[in-house]
Amino acid sequence: MVDHDAVTHVASLARVNLDDEEVEQFAAQFDDILSYFETLDSVPEVESDEELENVFRPDEVCDGLTQEEALQNAPETEDGYFEGPTVS
Amino acid sequence: MSETNAFITRTDIESDDSGPLDGQTVAVKDNISTKGVRTTCGSAMLEEYVPPYDATVVSKLKDAGATIVGKTNMDEFGMGTTTETSAFGATENPAAPGRVPGGSSGGSAAAVAAGEADLALGSDTGGSVRCPAAFCGVVGIKPTYGLVSRYGLVAYANSLEQIGPIAPTVESAAQLLEVIAGDDSHDATTRETDATYADAADGDVDGLTVGVPTELVDGADDAVVEQFEATLDSLCEQGAETVEVSLPSVETAVQAYYVIAMSEASSNLARFDGVRYGPDTEAEGNWNDSFAAVREEGFGEEVKRRILLGTYALSAGYHDKYYKKAQDARAWVRQDFAEAFESADVIASPTMPVAPFERGESLDDPLQMYLADANTVPANLANLPAISVPAGETEEGPVGLQLVGEAFDERTIIRTASAAE
């Protein structure tokens, strides 16, 4: 059973604010969706050996984005840095 | 805004180079980065975002002589089956007016179906190229995982998604696949290939075995199945034979797909914090408050729903119950396909079990919308190539035939699809 508190808790873990209407709607829908997901309990054990190989390349210096390019989409910058909110 | 609303941004990026796409116009899904041209992912979060670099597939289009005519509408961050979750409005289905074009690459398929572009690129995480191709009556290919570079594709669920072509014919889709395929030092999951694809569209299915899994046919609407079976009959008249195959694992494929995709999304979309890009909000408070406020404003309902469900599935106490089980289900799907390919060259089903929905029909019930992906998600879970090719129409709109092939055997599904055209 997913109640309002559970939705609010997950929303805070995911750092997404929700309004009251969304909390109510999600609580109702999540019950349906999660009980559907619970049918995964019936999945048998299978061998899951994948034939995968790591792909390596030489560690060579090459051009990346310039500082200007990296900052061009930021809402706020200062002295060539991203400007964010206070940390604590 | 055109009547179709296939494009979020129109462009006229002409190429200085000459190649196999000379004179061809291509529409590019708006989650594929284009240098200097905004790339929104259909989201208010990225309404003003202008990438400082081209995706590898975009560089390849330019090298091949193509003209890029616009960035196409899509479900927000690829999360949807109707293109209705876009922050830029719904897209019309040119092949079935009043109905959705499918999704999430609905703008790309609609642009091709309406003749607003010769070809298009979409991305397919759980059917997002094949579904709109089926609903709009055009051809779409989901390549084998690793055939096409994902560099510059804004990630939704990395372990599942591939960029793929949408085109009016199998041969032109195969031609576009040939242009975008190949290894890329920016995407370590790609691998080298010198395969050609356009020449595989020769219509020769003599002696080919087509496997038909009852699990993916039984759940489909009668009118859809009727068109599907007529198309199989036509393949048999051309020398193919059909065999029944069994894929019991598909019963939990949708659940596995959504748990994995939502979990990956909850992690991938953490980057949208309003610092490096995103809307400038006036939120007060510390980092967490500001982060949560930007995400409330920038994300639409479906994106919030998937981020929250993904966060839930990965949270302490639930990881083993959902995420780990979903990985087991994924391995089971892969094993089932491997067994099916012991008796069949390709595996056929309707691409979508239903005709295109009426617009607005599915918005209220997310679970019903997720279930519509039943036939497309298995190929993503198994990393296999799949194509959707038009297979007649019902009164409600076009039907697609889906053909799934063995890993890196795009040529066989292209050949089979070309015989079904």
Image (tube, coloured by chain):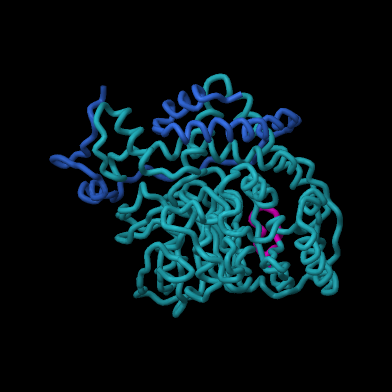
* Front one among A23 and A62: A23
Q: Is residue B303 magenta?
A: no
* Quadrant of residue B1 within the rendered picture: bottom left
* Front one among B96 and B188: B96
Farthest residue to the left: give it: A79
- As drawn, the chain in cyan is B
Report x, y in % for residue B205. Answer: 78, 70
* In the image, residue B316 above or below residue B23: above
Report x, y in % for residue A35. Answer: 66, 30
Query: Which corner quadrant holds the C terminus of chain B?
Result: bottom right
Q: Which residues are magenta?
A: B402-414
| Residue under the point 86% across and 54% down | B244
| Residue under the point 70% across and 57% down | B354
* In the image, residue B127 above or below residue B259: below
Q: Is residue B406 magenta?
A: yes
Asked whether, in this view, residue B164 is left or right of residue B413, the answer is left
In the rendering, what colour is chain A?
Answer: blue
